[in-house]
């Protein structure tokens, strides 16, 4: 997997295909390989770039706190390092969606389209934010096991466990590839992220929102409200999927994305 120096960190990423750039930004605490089905499908028609964010997969961590703006800056710098002048389609899942709002806020002219998967625009409430700070400390002191067990219970539709246990095993493997420092830094950054809900009406790029019908972390109802607040945005609910819709139901997710990207 190639690496490019992005600021102070060597950033791992996958690049495949030619055409309009499609940037795939993973969720927490995962890595680029959560997009394996989308990389395979869309590299036939697009220049797909799927990085590991700092502290995840093959990209080293920076301790303490990583603000979501920082991840967005890293992505802009990665695009610069790749010589990518043209606007990109930015597709982010969950934390990748939180980063998408920041990318839009700071780099709107570099954005052709937005795809937001299983994510929200609201900030954490006080209790959730405190919980994240406690988890960050726990991860630093005791490792990732507790977090992984909690996440495994929340990430998937119930039938994924019975019908596709390999998807859960793959996701666990990804989570084990994250570094303690990277996970703790992301948790602290998410805990203090801005609420973007009041800004949604300012988004002017074509936008698709999609999410699992059984997503327990970012429920469809909440995603529909986000879609309704963005002028002209499309909403697609993915049946039989939880929070990890792109891995749980790749065919339905790819169909929704392909329709949205059709010229
Ligand atoms: C994710 O999938 O990125 C996380 O569930 C985001 C979060 O913890 O809010």
Image (cartoon, grey):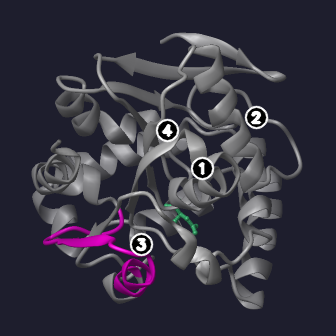
What residue did someone put label 3 on?
A: 154
Q: Which residue is located at x 16 percent, y 46 percent?
A: 258
Q: Which residue is located at x 26 percent, y 50 percent?
A: 247
Range of residues picked out in magenta: 223-243
Measured from the top left, where is residue 144 in percent x and y? 64, 51
Query: Are the two marked residues, 1 and 4, in contact with CB atoms closer than 8 angstroms?
Result: no
Mark nearest the camera among 3 and 4 is: 4
Measured from the top left, where is residue 140 in percent x and y? 81, 52
Q: Per the image, is 205 magenta? A: no
Query: Are the two marked residues, 3 and 2, in contact with CB atoms closer than 8 angstroms?
Result: no
Disc 3 CB within 8 Å of nearest ligand 1 atom = yes
Pick the residue in front: 99 or 62. 99
- Label 4 vs label 2: CA separation? 13 Å
Badge 3 density bin: few <14, some 14–19, many ≥20, Cα 10 Å: some
Q: Is residue 230 visible?
A: yes
Element marked by disc 3: helix
Q: Earlier in the sequence, mark 1 or mark 2?
A: 2
Mark nearest the camera among 3 and 1 is: 1
Side of 88 where 232 appears, left or right: left
Quarter of the picture holding the C terminus? top left
- Label 3 vs label 4: CA separation? 18 Å
The mark found on residue 31 in the picture is 4
- Label 3 vs label 2: CA separation? 25 Å
């Amino acid at each position: 997997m190639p690496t490019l120096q992005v600021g102070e960190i060597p950033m791992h990423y996958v690049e495949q295909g030619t055409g309009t750039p499609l940037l795939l930004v993973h969720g927490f605490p995962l890595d680029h390989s959560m997009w394996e089905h989308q990389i395979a499908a869309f590299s036939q028609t697009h220049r797909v770039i799927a990085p590991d964010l700092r502290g995840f997969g093959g990209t080293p961590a920076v301790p303490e706190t990583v603000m979501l703006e920082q991840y967005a800056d890293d992505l802009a710098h990665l695009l610069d390092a790749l010589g990518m002048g043209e606007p990109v389609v930015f597709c982010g899942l969950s934390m990748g969606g939180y980063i998408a709002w920041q990318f839009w806020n700071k780099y709107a002219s570099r954005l052709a389209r937005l795809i937001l998967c299983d994510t929200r625009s609201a900030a954490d409430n006080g209790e959730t934010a405190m919980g994240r700070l406690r988890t960050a400390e726990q991860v630093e002191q005791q490792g990732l096991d507790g977090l992984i067990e909690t996440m495994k219970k929340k990430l998937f539709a119930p039938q994924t466990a019975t019908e596709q246990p390999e998807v859960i095993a793959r996701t666990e493997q990804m989570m084990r590839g994250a570094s303690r420092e990277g996970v703790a830094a992301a948790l602290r950054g998410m805990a203090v992220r801005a609420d973007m809900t009041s800004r949604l009406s300012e988004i002017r790029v074509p936008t698709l929102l999609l999410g699992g019908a059984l997503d327990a972390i970012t429920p469809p109802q909440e995603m529909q409200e986000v879609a309704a607040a963005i002028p002209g945005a499309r909403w697609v609910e993915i049946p039989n999927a939880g929070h990890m819709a792109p891995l749980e139901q790749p065919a339905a997710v790819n169909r929704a994305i392909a329709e949205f990207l059709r010229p």
